[in-house]
């Protein structure tokens, strides 16, 4: 693993830790990472979930990005992302 990969791995781990603490910017950043596949495997369900959680925490840009992402998702995928977001909220 090269330095760039280690840095990206560390960045993702740091964003996850901050998201677990409820930091809106970290929730949003995870949405970006999952929507682009940077440092993680691209996963629109996960991206939508993180954008949704960031939007709930008051980040209006997360609402915009969530809506844009939803255009490329099926109803079932959106429902699953929403279910995962509700589940995450129950634990956090």
Image: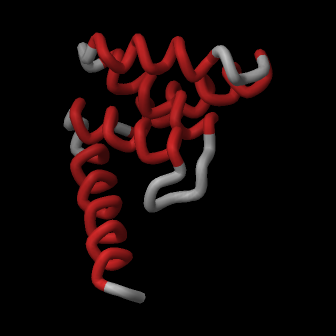
Which of 31 and 20 lies nearest the eye of the viewer?
Answer: 31
Say left or right for 24 vs 2: left
In this view, the residue in front, 29 or 88, is: 29
The relative height of residue 91 versus residue 67 in the rendered view (above or below) is below
At 62% from the left edge and 18% from the top edge, which residue is drawn?
Answer: 70
Q: What coloring was used for the rendering? A: secondary structure
Q: What residue is rendered at 52% in x and 12% in y? A: 67
Give percent across and percent down for residue 6.
32, 78
Q: Name the one closer to the observer, 13 or 42.
A: 42
Residue sitting at x 29%, y 83%: 3
Residue 17 in the figure: left or right of residue 41: left
Residue 56 percent across, percent down from the top left = 34, 16
- Residue visible at 39% across and 26% down in the picture: 53
In the rendered image of this protein, does residue 4 appear above or below residue 24?
below
**On screen, residue 53 above or below 70:** below
Q: Position of residue 28 (x, y in %)?
A: 33, 33
Image quadrant of residue 2? bottom left
In this picture, residue 29 sits left or right of residue 72: left
């Amino acid at each position: 693993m090269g330095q760039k990969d280690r840095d990206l791995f560390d960045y993702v781990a740091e964003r996850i830790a901050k998201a677990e603490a409820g930091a809106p910017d970290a929730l949003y950043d995870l949405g970006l990472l999952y929507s682009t596949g940077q440092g993680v495997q691209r996963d629109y369900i996960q991206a939508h979930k993180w954008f949704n959680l960031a939007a709930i925490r008051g980040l209006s840009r997360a609402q915009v990005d969530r809506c844009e992402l939803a255009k490329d998702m099926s109803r079932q995928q959106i429902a699953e992302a929403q279910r995962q977001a509700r589940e995450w909220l129950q634990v956090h």
